[in-house]
Image: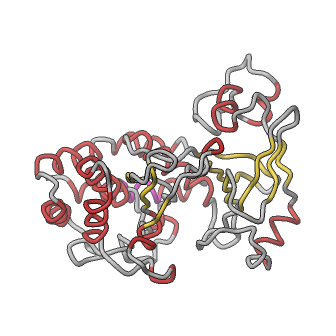
Amino acid sequence: MKCLYCNKPIADGATEQEKAQCWHTKCVKQFFGTAKFPLIDISDENLIEIAGESTNKGFTVPGVQKKLSLHFEGGAKPRLTLSNYPTGYILKPQTEDYEAMPEAEFLVMSMARVTGIRTVPFALIKLDGGYAYITRRIDRAYGNMLAMEDFCQLEERLTQDKYKGSYERCAKLIAKYSERRGFDLSEMFLRLVFSFVTGNSDMHLKNFSLIEDSAGSQKYVLSEAYDMLPVNAILPEDSEQFALTMNGKKRNIRRKDFFVFAENAGIPAAAAEKIISDVVSLEDTYVLMCKDSYLPGKLKATLADLIIARANILRV
């Protein structure tokens, strides 16, 4: 039994609440800010309604995956309830279209964290229909309102155009607006290498954002990573390896394409080489994480094979 937040074992001597929810008490405190695991005030009927016909009622946020906005109420009896406006948490339940999406996102986000990528707070929770993925909004952290603009907004594109553009253009946005240009360009490069290795072909313009470094500062940095999924493993028929072009391509990506991108973005070749080498060196770790994940067996094998194949492409 492992904690659905930190992914570390739940000890035999754990409390009944820890065993029932598969959450350490300290992890509940860190993620929700309360000593008690919140009551999840969402019924199966709510999920069916939202998935089926209430997308215009404000309960969901944009995206292919259903994302439910949740309001957290603290106090003696903390609980999470559906909200019709963006609040502190986002929940992604199971979907009928694709198997184990919450488990897949939890796994890849966990891999990202192991890789050294800064991520939003994320976890799994138990619902009657299985696991659901939950994340805490970083632009509404502990009562602070931070301005946050995704790259679709910065490019002045409509949401439906989020797949139009290039990672070179994304790098230029970072160079233009970020207060820590060099660090954020390297961070973006790391996320692209990692996404390629883990089959994440959905890093579109809305999956990169700049966020204020403190409330009202009007100084922006690359936000923590979010919405990372092994799309090429879940949808093997998807022939595109990237959501946006890199070196003019979305498929048949090779090692040299990353170096061309790095040169265009002003990232030193030695730094690019180290980032690629660091990610490739984690191949065995990623494969072990696949085998030890909550994914169904077939998807575990598919993703592990994909990671091995992609890592081999990036080797010298």
User: Which residue is nearer to you in this view: 131 or 311?
Assistant: 131
| Protein image colouring | secondary structure
Does 204 sit above or below residue 93?
Answer: below
- Where residue 47 sits, quadrant-wise, is bottom right
User: Which residue is nearer to you in this view: 274 or 153?
Assistant: 153
- Where residue 247 sits, quadrant-wise, is bottom left
53 on left or right of 135: right
Q: Residue furthest top?
A: 13
Residue 86 percent location from the top left of the image: 68, 61
156 on left or right of 276: right
Does 95 sit above or below residue 299?
Answer: below
Does 137 sit above or below residue 157?
Answer: above
Q: What residue appears at the point 76 percent right and 28 percent down from the top-left corner?
A: 35
User: Which residue is nearer to you in this view: 60 or 155?
Assistant: 155
Give the dominant element type of the magenta stretch: helix, strand or loop. Answer: helix
Q: What residue appears at the point 58 percent right and 34 percent down from the top-left corner?
A: 6
User: Does the stretch in magenta take in 304?
Assistant: yes
Q: Which residues are magenta?
A: 302-308
Q: How many marks?
A: 0
Q: What residue appears at the point 80 percent right and 34 percent down from the top-left corner?
A: 20
Q: Quadrant of the N terminus?
A: top right
231 on left or right of 132: left
Residue 141 percent location from the top left of the image: 60, 45
User: Does the stretch in magenta take in 58?
Assistant: no
Residue 18 percent location from the top left of the image: 75, 28
Residue 171 percent location from the top left of the image: 27, 64
